Amino acid sequence: MSDETKTYLPAGMPAPEATRDGLDREFWDAAKRHELVVQKCNSCGTFQFAPEWICHKCHSLDVGWHRVSGRGRIYS
Ligand SMILES: [Zn+2]
């Protein structure tokens, strides 16, 4: 089994993959490199997750991906 096909999921469950529309492709490509990336608006600097085509704060379409450390707090 290569590194790209290893998964923490039980046997028989499919590994997660990018959606067909490509919205989250950068996220999954980074995950394969063992990196964590999050969308960040290039207009207002706001981070957002899950990925969207538009910034939640300022509605700009200019959103990019930025590598992050993975350290932080989770709010739900
Ligand atoms: Zn924004």
Image (cartoon, rainbow, N blue to C red):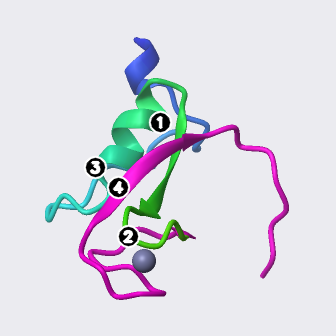
Q: Find the magenta span and give its range.
A: 47-76
Tag 3 residue = 25
- Whether residue 59 is situated above or below residue 6 in the rendered picture: below
Q: Is residue 49 magenta?
A: yes
Task: Measure how far apart labels 2 and 4 are at the Cα level.
Answer: 10 Å
Task: Measure how far apart labels 3 and 1 are at the Cα level.
Answer: 10 Å
Residue 57 image point, x, y percent: 48, 87
**How many numbered marks have been drawn onto this rendered protein structure?**
4
Q: Secondary structure at mark 3?
A: helix
Instruction: Say which of 51 and 45 sits in front.
Output: 45
Determine which of the numbered discs, if any, sits on residue 31 in the image.
1
Tag 4 residue = 64
**Eye-nearest disc, 2 or 1:** 2
Tag 2 residue = 43
- Whether residue 31 is situated above or below residue 25 in the rendered picture: above
What is the three-letter code of the residue carrying label 2? Answer: Ser
Task: Measure how far apart labels 2 and 3 are at the Cα level.
Answer: 21 Å
What is the three-letter code of the residue carrying label 4? Answer: Gly
Q: Are marks 3 and 4 in contact (CB under 8 Å)?
A: no
- Local packing at callout 3 (Cα closer than 10 Å; few below 14, some 14-19, many 20+) is some
- Whether residue 7 is situated above or below residue 18 in the rendered picture: above
Determine which of the numbered discs, if any, sits on residue 42 in the image.
none
> Which of the two labelled residues, at mark 2 and mark 1, occupies the earlier sequence position?
1
- Local packing at callout 4 (Cα closer than 10 Å; few below 14, some 14-19, many 20+) is some
**Eye-nearest disc, 1 or 4:** 4
What is the three-letter code of the residue carrying label 3? Answer: Arg
Residue depicted at 39% across the width and 22% down the height: 4
Q: Secondary structure at mark 4?
A: strand
**Eye-nearest disc, 2 or 3:** 2
Q: Is the residue marked 2 within 8 Å of ligand 1, measured from its CB?
A: yes
Instruction: Say which of 41 and 12 sits in front.
Output: 41
